[in-house]
Image: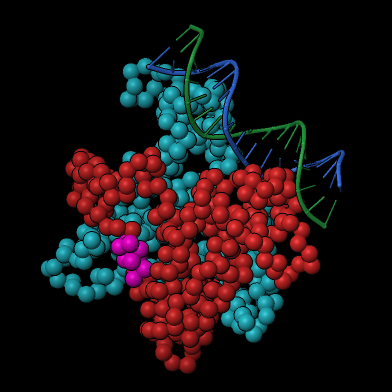
Chain colours: A cyan, B red, C blue, D green
Amino acid sequence: MAAESKGDDGPQQPGLTRRALVQAALRVLESEGVGGLSMRKLAAELGVKASSLYWHVRNKEELLDLLTDELMADAQAPPREGDWRQQLREYCMRYRRHLLGKRDAAKVVAGRLAPGPHLLRLMEDQLGRLREAGFSDADAAMINYLLGAFVQGFVLQEQGPLSASEAMGAGRREVATAAGEQLRRLPQDTFPNLVALAGDLTGPSMEARFSFALERLLDGLSTLLEQDGSDARNEGTSHE
Amino acid sequence: MAAESKGDDGPQQPGLTRRALVQAALRVLESEGVGGLSMRKLAAELGVKASSLYWHVRNKEELLDLLTDELMADAQAPPREGDWRQQLREYCMRYRRHLLGKRDAAKVVAGRLAPGPHLLRLMEDQLGRLREAGFSDADAAMINYLLGAFVQGFVLQEQGPLSASEAMGAGRREVATAAGEQLRRLPQDTFPNLVALAGDLTGPSMEARFSFALERLLDGLSTLLEQDGSDARNEGTSHE
DNA sequence: ACCTGAACACCGTTCAAGT
DNA sequence: ACCTGAACACCGTTCAAGT
């Protein structure tokens, strides 16, 4: 597979492109997970020895940087329909779905802000919508960061093993109800709230948790627009 | 250091307690970072061979579960003064400071929800305050989860290398201004917003970003309380 | 310019064997 | 019951050497 499309940036085909490297990394990630993504396996996927990779890439960190951007390659911005709130909601829900769709994506992306071209494209688009909605420049920049961190952090928890010792074995639902039982059995005099809210704490799906958090966040953002609808538009707080 | 206080749960001292194991792991984490925390180094810290550890702990995952809870051992709930908003703000800021204070804490804790006794203590306390503030049981449970995920996700980004290839080398400030320059140099016709907001995107400190996000979140939570201040208190939405 | 071979200094985990 | 020795199957990275 992966017939080498000769691309538009190189004069000859040296057998191994950075592009090919990253694509192969993507395949290994999908099939082996982040724990199985090693330089040696990646080399094998490319029919080459591990030491060869270091000609194209400084080290594994750099490879992961490239991979991070590649993970965003086919992410799509939502349609420009509805108000800003609807659009931001769609942005976050799509981003979450996108990350959930690629194996261990959140673990790769996790605190890796190195912005590649694919991410820049999405940032550009989102910033435009935020400014059109009436957010100040400073607020738009903050919101853009905040939403990314929010979704990434959330999916990280969602993709990781719920209770770590149960990494393999039981499904999420069983683990959750088991956790609920455990909470209910706590000593009621020292943990009255945990006992009382055992069901509320362990019942909601990740879907529901995400949705709840997102709506709260959007509520919070809307208060930024409520004051001044006047002409002092792009002079919001300056966050220095 | 670490004279073996004999504790209250074991009849004799077998030389190696789970407690001692975790304490040693904490020390190795502090001195070597999460990348340097290996079973072999941990064993060495305890004056023992790596294979011995597997008598006390199923595998490294379990060790990290225990470590995760131990990282919360000396976390403190904020004083009960001010309104709910002030208290929740303090909760989040303290949690952030706490994680920032322990090397690579966020990376260990990251999607590891296995709740140990220390975390349970904090949850119990926070849930109590949320209910007293007037949040429904379902909302209180959601908020408790949400705030934890929020702070953890945020600190993860903050503790990781900003731009990954610059893991070592330049300080955060230089990296940020360099990123700003890079944004400003983008083609203005395809990235007008990134060019215009380059300063707003790269200027704010992590402190400011966290603060902004937190206030937005708190704004969003307060809208949950604005409707019904009446008697239908603990009958909020049910999030199933 | 690009790739290999061989080595270095590591990993997590298992399991028979010791005491 | 608790710990060790030795092994297995891996890692990331370097660097002289090949072509």
Quarter of the image holding residue A45?
top right
Report x, y in % for residue C14.
77, 42
Residue A130 included in the magenta stretch of the image: no
Q: Is residue B119 above or below residue B181?
A: below
Report x, y in % for residue C11.
62, 41
Q: What quarter of the picture does the C terminus of chain A occupy?
A: bottom left
Q: Residue at x 40, y 69 (%)?
A: B93
Residue projecting furthest to the left: A231
Report x, y in % for residue A152.
44, 55
Quarter of the image holding residue B181?
top left
Residue B213 included in the magenta stretch of the image: yes
Residue projecting furthest to the bottom: B231
A170, B169: nearer the viewer: B169
Report x, y in % for residue A109.
45, 47
Q: Is residue B95 above or below residue B174?
A: below
B32, A72: nearer the viewer: B32
Dominant SS type (magenta):
helix
Count of marks overlaid on the render: 0
Left or right: where A29 falls relative to B48: left
Q: Residue at x 75, y 52 (%)?
A: B55
Q: Residue at x 50, y 77 (%)?
A: B126
Q: Is any atom of residue B226 visible in this view?
A: yes
Left or right: where B182 falls relative to C1: left
Q: Is residue B167 above or below residue D18?
A: below
Q: Residue at x 48, y 53 (%)?
A: B104
Q: Which residues are magenta?
A: B207-215
Q: Is any atom of residue A90 visible in this view?
A: no
Quarter of the image holding residue B62?
bottom right
A71, B167: nearer the viewer: B167
